Image (cartoon, coloured by chain):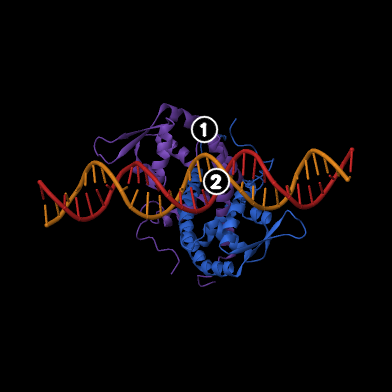
Chain colours: A blue, B purple, C red, D orange
Amino acid sequence: MEPRGGWLDETEQRAWQGLIGFAMLALPELERAHRRHGLVHIEYGLLAALSDRSYRLSELAAMLTMSQSRLSHRMNKLRDRGLVLLSPSPEDGRVTVAEISPAGRALVESIAPGHVEDVRRLVFDNLTPAQTEALADALTAVIGGLGSCGPIDRPAPDCPPPGCP
Amino acid sequence: MEPRGGWLDETEQRAWQGLIGFAMLALPELERAHRRHGLVHIEYGLLAALSDRSYRLSELAAMLTMSQSRLSHRMNKLRDRGLVLLSPSPEDGRVTVAEISPAGRALVESIAPGHVEDVRRLVFDNLTPAQTEALADALTAVIGGLGSCGPIDRPAPDCPPPGCP
DNA sequence: GGGGGAAACTTGATGCTTCAAGCTATCGGA
DNA sequence: TCCGATAGCTTGAAGCATCAAGTTTCCCCC
């Protein structure tokens, strides 16, 4: 077996191709589906999160692993379209709290079923239950290892620096 | 068992979260790594493909599942930087053939080892061999099912229309 | 042999993401 | 009390992806 540090072995290549393929095929397909409703994918995620309860913006950014800048731009759009409400927190003058509007709730609820159907069609219809579970386990392990490497605004310092000597 | 069409079950949710998490954490990290060398991720893919042999542009677009428009924009940049050469095919006046330049080859060869290391660090260091194989199998099945749903320029007609009635 | 149609690629506009600054508000210590 | 440091968020510019034409070349059938 290769001692490490060489090229990817055949199985790893297949897995890597699969991950990239997913990002290049399935995600754009979902993106298009959302855009037909006037949203980008991340906006759907935001509305879905806010349909549960209100959040501070920094909480939202952390939950969806997006930068605060990106969140700010997106929330402005959503507010302009009347889908969310932004109000400064009375307790801390720095934070602003985001809340979904009735229109936003109506929109996300009208989109959700189709979205679930798309996810099924694109991913889970092609997998056996055992494969789905194995996929979940493997990706959970990957995400767990990535955890500290936030590609958010402030990447954690304990994230090993990228492989450029 | 749910008859179908409901929300995702718990395992499916975990798998879906993993896929999205990968796209939101690992891919941006790789993107940043490439940008330190002045490339975007897809440009690395293009140079890597061309380091093997020359290709017609439409071949490249199909291989990397990108639209011809996107490819055109990107190839112009790469040509402007002297990393690839574009020449019209003598056999068919419509096609143009892309070839890597010495500078392009030197660049991709200098980047490749670090890239492999990044992929290992971000993904495969967190997986056992069995998990890697399961991941590869599951994703191969997903991609296979997606096959006809090209998010390329011309989506295949047999791709079931997205779930928006 | 000429004309409709398709293939290969290009172009330009629009919108999203990213990056680097910037701005308040809050907290801690001297 | 005041001042530096930090947290939370915003802003603007630059670059990439996407979409909808547009152009040229080739094919092929009438």
User: How far is the residue under mark 1 from the one under mark 2?
Assistant: 17 Å
In front here: B94 or B128?
B94
In the shown orientation, is residue A28 left or right of residue A140? left
Please give the residue where the numbered disc 2 appears in the rendered image: B27
Task: Give me the residue at 40% from left, 63% from top.
Answer: B161
Q: Position of residue A145 (x, y in %)?
A: 64, 46
The correct choice, above or below, for B82 with respect to B64 in the image is above
* Mark positioned earlier in the residue sequence (1 or 2): 2
Q: Which quadrant, please, contains the C terminus of chain A?
A: top right
Q: Residues within 10 Å of mark 2 (few under 14, many from 20)?
A: some
**As rendered, which of A61 and A101 lies closer to the eye?**
A101
The residue that disc 1 covers is: B111
Q: Give the amino acid at mark 2.
A: Leu
Whether residue B103 is situated above or below residue A154 in the rendered picture? above
Badge 1: chain ID: B
Query: Are discs 1 and 2 less than 8 Å apart at CB?
Result: no
Question: Is label 2 in a helix, a strand or a loop?
Answer: helix
Q: Is residue A86 visible?
A: yes
Specify the amino acid type for callout 1: Ile
Task: Describe residue B23's horizontal placement relative to residue A91 as left or right.
Answer: left
